[in-house]
Image (spheres, helix red, strand yellow):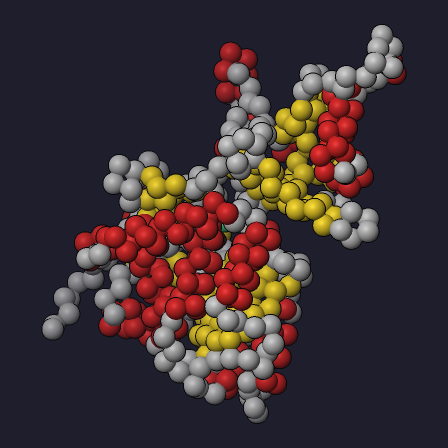
Amino acid sequence: MQKPLAYTPKNVWETLTRREEVDALATRYIDFLSRCKTERETVAYVCECLAKAGFSEDFTKKSVFRSLRGKTVFAARRGRNPLSDGFALIAAHVDTPRLDFKQRPLIEQPGVVQAKTHYYGGIRKYQWLARPLALHGVIVRENGEKLPVTLGEKPDEPVFCIADLLPHLAQKQGAQTINDAFEGEKLNLVLAHSPAPDTKTKGKADKKTEPVKDHLLILLHKQYGITEEDLITAEVQAVPAGPARFAGFDRSLVGGYGQDDRICVFTALEALLNAKSAGRNMAVIFWDKEEIGSDGATGATSRFFQYCVEDLSRTWGRKASTAQIFLATQAISADVQGALDPDFQDLHEKQNAALLGYGPCFSKFTGSRGKYGASEADAEFFASLRGLLNAKSIPWQTAELGKVDAGGGGTVALHLAAYGMQVIDFGPALLSMHSPFELASCADLWATLAAYRAFFED
Ligand code: MN
Ligand code: MN
């Protein structure tokens, strides 16, 4: 068939024949999003799925995985091709913007005890006010004993909340810029409000200056056996409470927290587990710390990924050097793109903007201004992926994040490119990205899984 001369992106919904498959996939995705709200929970879920599917931590086996500190995980499936031909690799990230407890979080202010927080990643602070939040994380005792924390998700559990200013007193704030109006130091979570029922100090107000905090510490000790000092070394994150869910009359969208980048983690993992091997060695790496620049032992700039490949070069690789493996590897940096916002269309250059429902989106480069802070995929690799998807009739699109000079952002692509491999950003578009309730198209979820699978099966 002659190709049309002009290019038009395809709407995934118009190509779908089995809507029930899309609904079933979205239902499983919603369950995953509702269960996995932190990097630790996501990595634990991934490891559990891999172990169930027969993946081993023994690198002499054909399907292997390894995690580091429960915050990043590498997995690979051996193909018929020699390892010197490299991997088909998909990289995504498991961390999401949130509010972390400070090391000494508890403060008593008039009427309440609050937890002071330090935000992680790019948030719009006002989106976190006056909404139910849950606490997820881990408390580690001096003896090394770990106490996992998940509080505020079950209907009978209490939630937590940052109070917002009432409109009646917000006149001055209304005239301020957003940055001035919402301060990081005011992102304080209400934890408790009732004073300790202490009879000994009754009537001696000077002796009991923090009655609510005293009460909270008594409760924490009774329920969890912890003291205030245990909080200092803990990792406690405040995240939006409650499950992800279908959105829209037509149930065509998934709404939920942390879809940047768990939609790519979910689809890449499904693709790895279900791809029919056509010869390629397949691998995924799910990193932490992407939202704060990819530094740290579990981020994309650490050597962990390299160590995994080095170990596989010894067990699977025969004489392949790691340099050979890296240089021959083709990678998808699986991260989300900002969808064209219907109410802020002027911030996008529409011809090069991502549309919800038009399939996973290629970004040849990310970064800002004159393409600063990004790697750029080469034309040969980009064209080969385009050919692969067209041959399988999987819709795709291409986009830049907003107008030139409107802002920008980065992904892990440049950290993969540093190994010399071919890499391109490729993932679904989201509305309300980085908000407590991001929106993704069920059609894009389906098409992204199909595309990642096609990449592995090529
Ligand atoms: Mn991301
Ligand atoms: Mn992000």
Residue 213 at least partly seen: no
Residue 172: percent from left, percent from top: 55, 17
> Is 354 in front, or is 453?
453
Q: Eyeballing the image, is 455 above or below 107?
A: below
On the rendered structure, is 371 left or right of 455?
A: right
Residue found 50% across the figure and 56% down from its top: 410
Quadrant in the picture for residue 376: bottom left
Q: Position of residue 331 (x, y in %)?
A: 45, 70
- Looking at the image, residue 47 lies above or below residue 347: below
Picture quarter with the N terminus = bottom left
Q: Is residue 310 left or right of residue 196?
A: left
Residue sticking out furthest to the bottom: 319
Q: Position of residue 211 (x, y in %)?
A: 78, 19
Give me the residue at 34% from left, 54% from top.
25
- Residue at 60% across, 37% down: 151
Indicate left or right for 236 with 379 as reference.
Answer: right
Tell me which residue sits at (57%, 92%) in the image.
319
Q: Position of residue 358 (x, y in %)?
A: 27, 54
Q: Residue furthest left?
A: 1
In the image shown, does 420 or 316 lie closer to the viewer? 316
